[in-house]
Amino acid sequence: MQINCIFARFFDVMKSIVHSEAELHRAAQELLSAFPAARVFCFYGEMGAGKTTFIKVLCQTLGVEDVTSSPTFAIVNEYLTETGESIYHFDFYRIESLAEAYEIGVEDYLYSGSYCFIEWTEKIEPLVQPEFVKVSISVQENGDRWIIAE
Ligand SMILES: Nc1ncnc2c1ncn2[C@@H]1O[C@H](COP(=O)(O)OP(=O)(O)O)[C@@H](O)[C@H]1O
Ligand SMILES: [Mg+2]
């Protein structure tokens, strides 16, 4: 029998093994229920690891009907849930300095109480707070993704 998910609740670590994109829905449920009070999720993982794909599934899980909007966005993209709540998706890949993040008002978003999902968190590392959830996605040799959140 294959073990898909290891809920290591001690130390507040969640590990989810994902064999295909279809399984991301289960992983999204696991992540959100492991950290019910968290609103800011910082993603780590190489290009192609699946950060954008997983964030879109998380948005769907939270009630966003159309996650296809704005396939290319500058730094921040806003999704609306069916109940009218905002979710912010950041991609800091192209910023060259922390000042650019401040210019878009990153701190206002991070402390807005809305869900924030951040790609290329490395670029804004000084702004990362202990209460933010860090989500690492790594691709295994067989194509599985390990999603580790703490
Ligand atoms: N869990 C997964 N299993 C298999 N393929 C995946 C998975 N997540 C993403 N992919 C595929 O990997 C590619 C890169 O995904 P993407 O989300 O754009 O990565 P990133 O944002 O980390 O650069 C896409 O073609 C996507 O369909
Ligand atoms: Mg991406």
Image (cartoon, rainbow, N blue to C red):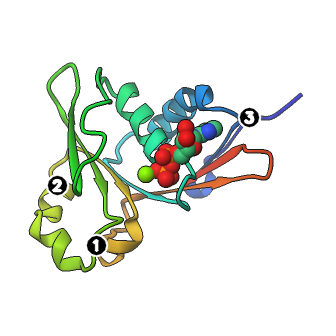
Residue that sits furthest to the front in the current view: 72
Ligand 1 located in image quadrant: top right
Which disc, if any, is residue 4? 3
- Residue type at mark 2: give it: Tyr
The quarter of the rendered structure image containing the N terminus is: top right
Residue 20, position as x, y percentages in the image: 66, 32
Q: Is residue 111 left or right of residue 65?
A: left
Q: Is residue 20 left or right of residue 81?
A: right
Q: Is residue 7 left or right of residue 12?
A: right
The span from disc 1 to disc 2 (Cα, nearest Å) is 12 Å
Q: Is residue 64 above or below residue 90?
A: above
Question: Which residue is rendered at x = 17% and y = 63% of the image?
Answer: 106
Which disc, if any, is residue 127? 1
Q: Is residue 20 above or below residue 119?
A: above
Element carrying mark 1: helix
Of labels 3 and 1, earlier in sequence is 3
Residue 144, position as x, y percentages in the image: 72, 43
Question: Which residue is rendered at x = 62% and y = 53% of the image?
Answer: 10
Residue topped by disc 2: 109
- Residue type at mark 1: give it: Leu
- Residue type at mark 3: give it: Asn
Q: In which quarter of the view is residue 82 placed?
A: top left
Q: Nearer the viewer, residue 115 or 35?
A: 115
Residue 53, position as x, y percentages in the image: 47, 40
- Does mark 1's beta carbon lie closer than 8 Å to ligand 2? no
Element carrying mark 2: helix
